[in-house]
Image: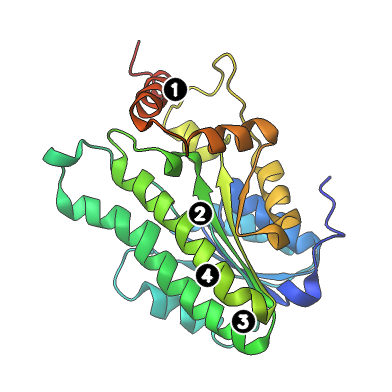
Amino acid sequence: MTDTSTIDAAKYGPWAVIAGGSEGVGSSFAEQLAAAGINLVLLARKPGPLEETAEKVRALGVEVRTLSVDLIAPGAVEQIRAVTDPLEVGLFIFNAGANTYANEFVTADLTKVQEVIDLNITRQLELSQHFGALMKERGRGGIILLGSMAGYLGTEMIGIYAAAKAFSRVFAEGLWLELKAHDVDVLHLVLGVTRTPSMERHGLKMDLPGLDVAAPADVAAEGLARITEGPVWVAGGEANFTNAKKRLGFPRGPMVEASAKASRKMMGFDE
């Protein structure tokens, strides 16, 4: 059972908005925040899993509102504001970033490339600005942006996604500096390999020797526990933290190639 006693509901409530709140880490965030007494607005594209999670957390005694929305669709931010503007939002979690297109860049469909950018960068910026401005004015709150170890090294086939995660990390550092004086916490929570439904649907091999795989509930708990220790926290313990530090070193070429080899194995490309 996750300890929710350390979650400051007075600072991060009475409402939290979770983009990508239907399953995996997003669902775990929802459960843990609900257990702490914080009401929820859950955003996700698929209505089925979204409503399943909503019903589960309503049973914990909080109010839950849902919006099935495609974040890259025109008008998505307006739809979200229609639901959230009447509410006092103390915590915004952007867990919606994902790789929606894998292809080598030089032969890629640039429309699909742009969708990866719109989801992982543009929408994250728009929503962070909107909720961040309200929190600054109120003088309290928190923002958690979900990152990835992919954002520490260039990656073949998903290079745009990896670059977007690198952008998010640097963006979070700047936002953290801007908002810390207003008692608004900002955390870029870096995930290693995490056993989410999305990872399993993509058929990634998560049982390879030496691969440390995290549970979504543990990642969410770590993010909530470390939100005041921004701007960046690497989830999953000392091994992942050390791995992230190594990925920032030089020379770059051997590290990029070694990471690509490990990624191919996890994705089953080297069989």
Give the residue pinned by disc 1. Answer: 266
Q: Is residue 6 above or below residue 74?
A: above
The vertical placement of 267 against 119, above or below, is above
Residue located beneath label 4 in the image: 175
Q: Callout 1: helix, strand or loop?
A: helix
Considering every residue shown, the one lying at the far front of the view is 250
Verify CB contact (< 8 Å) between mark 4 and mark 2: no
Which SS class for mark 2? helix
Residue underneath mark 3:
135
Give above or below for 90 relative to 256. Answer: below
Colour mapping: rainbow
What type is the residue that disc 4 sits on? Answer: Leu
Q: Secondary structure at mark 3?
A: helix
The amino acid sitting under disc 3 is Met
Q: Residue at x 33, y 28 (%)?
A: 253
Residue indicated by mark 2: 48
Q: Nearer the viewer, mark 3 or mark 2?
A: 3
Q: Nearer the viewer, residue 4 or 129?
A: 129
Q: Nearer the viewer, residue 181 or 123?
A: 181
- Type of amino acid under label 2: Gly
